[in-house]
Image (cartoon, helix red, strand yellow):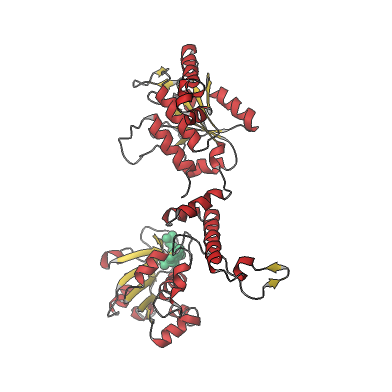
Amino acid sequence: MNFHLVSIFPHFFESPLGSGLMSKAVDTGLVGLDFVDVRQFAGGVYKSVDDRPFGGGPGMLLKLDPMVKALDSIPSRGRILMLSPRGKPFTQAQARELALEDDVTLICGRYEGIDERLLDLYPVELVSVGDFVLNGGEAAAVCLVEAVARLLPGFMGHEESGDEESFSAGLLEYPHYTRPEEFDGLTVPEVLRSGDHGRITAWRREQSLTATLRDRPDVLPTARLTVEDIDFLRRLPRTRLGRNLYIALCHYPVTNKFGEKVAVSVTNLDLHDMARVARSYGLGGFYATTPIEDQKALAERLLGHWREGAGAQANPDRAEAFAKVKVFDDIEGAVLDIEAQTGQRPRFAATSARLDRRKQAQPALTFGDVRSWLANSPVLLIFGTGHGLAEEVLSKTDGIVRPLRYLDDYNHLSVRSAVAIIVDRLVADEY
Ligand SMILES: C[S@@+](CC[C@H](N)C(=O)[O-])C[C@H]1O[C@@H](n2cnc3c(N)ncnc32)[C@H](O)[C@@H]1O
């Protein structure tokens, strides 16, 4: 397989791509490295490859002309990739895909990057090696070349090496140990010295699962997990952010479709479904708030039915869900209750189906913002009935969570659906 490395600093690659297994692969012809020096294609006395950007701003840009000539000098370019922090993140799956190619051309930027019109002239795919900014694309290209080349049959000497590694099965790899068996009082885990291959395989799988849940839970959704894996993961300790999350359904003050302040009736359906969400996601609690006496009485009757009455007899798991529900006059009552339970005043976030277009409105809270609050303090997430929470509630909160489906104009979900989706986005299992 041939890599064509297009760069203004081709010497950069000498050491990293001239060592270890890579140099062996080049010697045996498994990997071909073709260094294309862009400066050689620059005109003028100074062979200048860069110029100032139109529109101003700091730094210089690589010019089109030498870059185009450099690319055109490559007889068989194959796929053209440009290293760029703006690119799609490079992954093990992509490395596997590229390892099937005969030729890959890698364009390395420098300074502020390359004149954008290069992307109009060639079918260039932008790839990033991480959310950070390097001085140039060369170090990133080395990462990519190594990741791809080591997957070529014959590169590593023992073919199975690549299959067990991190990301290959959607999990991080298990830890390794070598001689001596004891170092400064630290011993190699007994199971690895037992010679029992069944136990060793099981131990390694469990170590992979433990490390992935602890360090990279975001990769778990791509892992193919067996029932045994999931049973094992369930037994592991993990942060339960949901315990800090409290939800409230506010029945007054909310608005009607004319923007007037109104009260909305309590419904069995809302209490029922939100209680089940609160229990399923292990939330701290669920408050239904209304100052209207007959509505409070209705809510208490509904709760009684499901907690102690016929509903509880027929569905004991509903009784468990309804144990989470409390009825208060207003949000302040819920706040005092959370304070009494946790010793901390909760942070408040409101929810709304509409973007906040009030003058001086802050940008909406992201789910990440609320998740970071949950790590340190209780959070009360307030949902409205009717046409949404009234201004006097919104103005007391620490922010409004970005609406669901905010890139589309029709997002009229029932409050029950919105509760389920928002709570899931905040505290769902990563697997
Ligand atoms: C200083 S950077 C230019 C950054 C550019 N102004 C931006 O903010 O996107 C110079 C070159 O380094 C390379 N580079 C920097 N960070 C990278 C990353 N995370 N992944 C891949 N290439 C990167 C690119 O080739 C880029 O053109």
Q: Is 118 or 384 nearer to us in this picture?
A: 384
Where is residue 338 drawn, in percent x and y?
59, 29
Which x, y percent locates residue 178?
61, 74
Q: Is residue 48 visible?
A: no
Q: Residue furthest right?
A: 185
Image position of 261 (left or right of 331)? left
Q: Position of residue 1 (x, y in %)?
A: 35, 79
User: What residue do we see at 46% from left, 78% from top?
Assistant: 158
Q: Which image quarter: residue 70?
A: bottom left
- Asked if 252 appears above or below 49 in the picture, the reply is above
> Is residue 27 or residue 230 the one in the foreground?
230
Q: Is residue 237 visible?
A: yes
- Where on the image, by quarter, is ligand 1? bottom left
> On the picture, is 230 further left or further right than 51?
right
Residue 59 placement: quadrant? bottom left
Nearer to us in this view, 105 or 100:
100
At x 41% / y 87%, what residue is drawn? 28
| The furthest residue to the top | 294
Q: Pinpoint residue 46: horizontal percent, then vertical percent.
A: 39, 79
Foreground of the two, 165 or 84: 165
